[in-house]
Amino acid sequence: MQFKRIEYHTVHSHFDYDIPDEDIIASWGSIERFRQVVSHMNHSSDWDDQPFGEPPTNEEEDLWFEFFENYSYDREDDWFSDRKGGYDVSYQVIDDEEEFYDANDSDEGLIH
């Protein structure tokens, strides 16, 4: 018998960049302006600081996503739900090798 265990996890991915100040100044005009844009671009509830300075312009928002493409980063994944627990698990009996039910689409063969 083929059997599948499916775990649904939350992963926090941390991307650490080391960008030269000169590059930031060349693209954003100043370190201070870059810090202002950063404060407005954060969409996490974990951020303690409130946005400050002028909100980014449309051009700065476009630049925001393009800017980081030019730099490498170190990535660390924190499998938060694996480390802390609290993730959902489902089990599935696979009747045929060709049949892999998506647990989100069908409860057929699932044991909850």
Image (tube, rainbow, N blue to C red):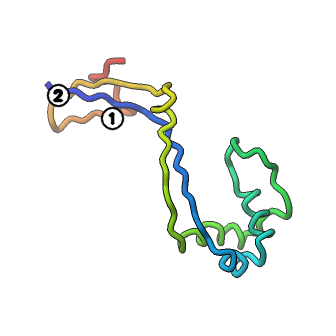
Q: Quadrant of residue 99?
A: top left
Q: Amino acid at mark 2?
A: Gln
| Residue under label 2 | 2
Residue found at x 65% / y 72%: 63
> Observer-nearest residue: 96 or 90?
90
Q: Earlier in the sequence, mark 1 or mark 2?
A: 2
Left or right of 10, for residue 36 = right
Closer to the camera, 96 or 18? 18
Please determine whether, in this image, residue 1 is positioned above or below residue 72. Answer: above
| Mark 1: few/some/many CA within 10 Å (<14, 14-19, 20+) | few
Mark 1: which amino acid? Asp
Instruction: Say whether residue 85 is left or right of residue 26.
Output: left
Mark 2 crowdedness (10 Å alpha carbons): few <14, some 14-19, many ≥20: few
Q: Residue at x 38, y 31 (%)?
A: 7
- The residue under the point 54% across, 57% down is 15
Which residue is the site of mark 1? Answer: 102
Horizontal side, residue 53 vs residue 110: left or right: right
Q: CA distance from mark 1 to mark 2?
A: 15 Å
Q: Give percent across and percent down for residue 60.
A: 71, 71
Which numbered tag is attached to residue 71?
A: none
Direction from residue 72 to residue 27 in the image, left or right:
right
Q: Which quadrant does the N terminus fall into?
A: top left
Name which quarter of the figure residue 70 lies in.
bottom right
Quadrant of the rendering where the C terminus is positioned: top left
- Residue 39 to residue 49: above or below: below
Name the residue at 50% across, 59% down. 74
Is the Cβ of the residue at disc 1 closer than 8 Å to that at disc 2? no
Callout 1: SS: loop
**Which one is in front, 106 or 92?**
92
Instruction: Determine whether the residue tagged by mark 2 lies in a helix, strand or loop.
Output: strand
Kindly report which numbered mark, 1 or 2, lies closer to the viewer in this rendering: 2
Q: Is residue 52 above or below residue 61?
A: above
